[in-house]
Image (cartoon, rainbow, N blue to C red):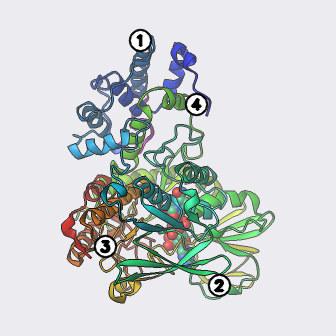
Amino acid sequence: MAPRRESEHSNVSDARLAKMVAESDLPSLLAALAHVCSAPDLPGTGLLLDQAKHHEPQGGWTLDQQSHARAIALGALIELRDAGWPAAQKPTADGVRPIMTWMMSREASDDYVELLLEELGDPPADLRAPSWSAADIAADRGLRVAVIGAGMSGLLAAHRLRQAGIDVVVFDKNADVGGTWLQNTYPGCRVDVASHLYCYSFAQRDDWPQHFSTQPELLDYFREFAADSGVLPLVHFSTSVAAVAFDDQSATWDVHTVDALGHEATERFDAVINATGQLNRPKLPDIAGRDSFAGPAFHSAEWDHGVDLVGKRVAVIGTGASAAQFIPIAAEQADQVFVLQRTPNWLAPTLDYHSDFPTGQRWLLNHLPYYSQWYRFWLFWRYAEGILPSVKVDPAWDGQGHSVSEANELLRMQLGMYLGLCFGDRPDLLAKVMPDYPPAAKRIVRDNGVWATTLKRDNVHLITEPIAAIQPTGLRMVDGSELDVDVIIYGTGFQASHFLTPMKVTGRHGVDLHEQWDGNARAYLGIVVPNFPNFFLLYGPNTNIVVNGSIIYFSECEVHYMMQCLHHVLTTKARAIDCRPAVHDAYNERIDEGNRLMAWGASGVNSWYKSDSGRVAQNWPFSLLEFWQQTRELDSADYELL
Ligand code: NAP
């Protein structure tokens, strides 16, 4: 990031300002200017955001509307510069509400305003940091907490625990921090959530190089965070947690670990936080003869960089979000690539998916107060909350399995048009890539046109014939044809619904977590499970989001709630707290009902969102706001004190 130069800031010419405006995100820019100029009516120019186009760049405005918006923004920026860039008002509820209402095209509720104020903050304040310290509440009681996993959620939990003065030890099976961003090194790996959203609210960066961060960039971010936050020295690397067991007598947890050399150890803790995530155990397909293949074969999350694809015939099994990222690169290297597709993806057109962040916009992030916060809010609204209505089931709608509501049908038509545009010249491919299930029943994959370009290459072959078996030379298909290949790459996803495997977790009175779950992982708020006192899950059951909100937002909510639980333990002088089964059960009934009314629950299509029994075990069916509301305050009635 170029160092900020004040002289440049104050003397910036009209022409340069115009360049910044030209490269800006207009809805965010107008919002920031309305905020900075204390003129909530600034955007009140007839440029109302059209909700149906929230997922489109620049709010889906026409070119005329965009130039009108640019003229307003440039005028306001010139005035601000001429006035010497007066200090902006700190955000207040009354100040931000009209701007939010304008951005959302609907009245911003009090809760939403409060949530946004937390996000907007007053940089560099961390408004979600615990406001208490363990020593102040119970000086004589040293709480010791184990965190399992040093990925995004585990690092966050350890940081918050440290902020509250709680003794924390982190265990990770890997040799470095980063979790999923350490393990997934396949070519082309990047996040499909906008960079400025996919970062902690209190550690935002203005200098993300690209709109959507690459895996190395994210790994650096988490490494830097681990070092800067002081969590890094607390991590025991290359140490797997094999088992955790609750001791009824002392109400503490024994954590059994095995290090890389096979040394076993047991340590005692007051609480355990599982931050192993949902997508960390690769799933290999159950295809006959899988182990008989004579050549190299590997999973996307265990990419074998020692295998040179140049000149090879490569079969890729799976076409999910991971495969969609690495196939285009493999196709540039390999002689032939055979793409084995079982179910096609809906593609979300994202022109800037691989693009650098424009310098003009970066200038605004650095110089225009609150632009970065409004930009983040806009991403939050545009990518997640704003799209939610179009993936909800309307029970009265008969979409014949293709859509779940009128809004979903509209989305299906928009996404279908995009596929039509991409594959219009190849009806043979179009027929194969057009999904027949409702949008958002499976993860929608981002695309900037590269999927079509790749599938149209002469050396790429899209195969939809099911695989019958794997044999030493390659694949045998159900129709009896054979496909000889040199390399097989599995883009077949993760054992997402097998939470906490292969760890053994024993709770009160010797109850085994996996036996209690019986293949159907459930938790209250996705965080706590009855019979497992002071045991907290991050990114646990039903905390995944389908439309592209940031999972980091969820982790922040979960960690906030977990911290309240520990606060409750300290203030009540309890040894531990255990969620009441009735609370847990009622909550899960509501979750199941909610998921039945979402595209992913209503559709019978395959997806990693469901457990083997077909229950949606992964997804949160409500708004992001609602998860924040539910995790904001602990209700002591939900818990039994031990
Ligand atoms: P995935 O979405 O579960 O995709 C697995 C693919 O393998 C699917 O195409 C699936 O087909 C296919 N498959 C599985 N078993 C098969 C079999 N026996 N025969 C033929 N095909 C089989 O896994 P993923 O692509 O690794 O992505 C998982 C999740 O990770 C994503 O949804 C996303 O949340 C996250 N992710 C995100 C990014 C990103 O941010 N850009 C990148 C990668 C992953 P079916 O569809 O028919 O089941």
Q: Residue at x 23, y 46 (%)?
A: 111
Instruction: Report helix, strand or loop for mark 1.
Output: loop
- Compared to 204, does 466 lie above or below? below
Mark 2 vs 4, N-terminal side: 2
Circles 1 and 3, Cβ within 8 Å, touching? The answer is: no
Mark 3 or mark 2, which has the lower sequence index? 2
Closest to the camera, between mark 3 and mark 2, is: 3
The residue singled out by tag 1 in the image is: 83
Amino acid carrying label 1: it is: Ala
From the viewer's perspective, is 602 left or right of 479?
left
- Mark 4 residue CB less than 8 A from any atom of ligand 1: no
Residue 152: image x %, image y %?
Answer: 50, 58
Frontmost of labels 3 and 4 is: 3
Between residues 59 and 410, which one lies in front from this camera angle? 59
| Labels 1, 3: front one | 3
Structural crowding at the residue carrying mark 2, measured as other residues with C-alpha within 10 Å and reported as few (<14), some (14–19) or many (≥20): some
What residue sits 36% from the left and 54% below the top?
133
Quadrant position of the N terminus in the picture: top right
- Write down the residue under mark 4: 359
Find the magenta span and give its range.
Answer: 53-63
> Which amino acid, mark 4?
Thr
Q: Amino acid at mark 2?
A: Arg
Q: Nearer the viewer, mark 4 or mark 1?
A: 1
Residue at label 3? 575
Quadrant, the C terminus = bottom left
First reached walking from the N terminus: tag 4 or tag 1: 1
Which label sits in the foreground, 2 or 1? 1
Query: Magenta span has 199?
Result: no
Of pointers 2 and 1, the one earlier in the residue sequence: 1
Q: Amino acid at mark 3?
A: Arg
Q: For residue 290, which numbered disc appears in the image?
A: 2
- Callout 2 secondary element: helix
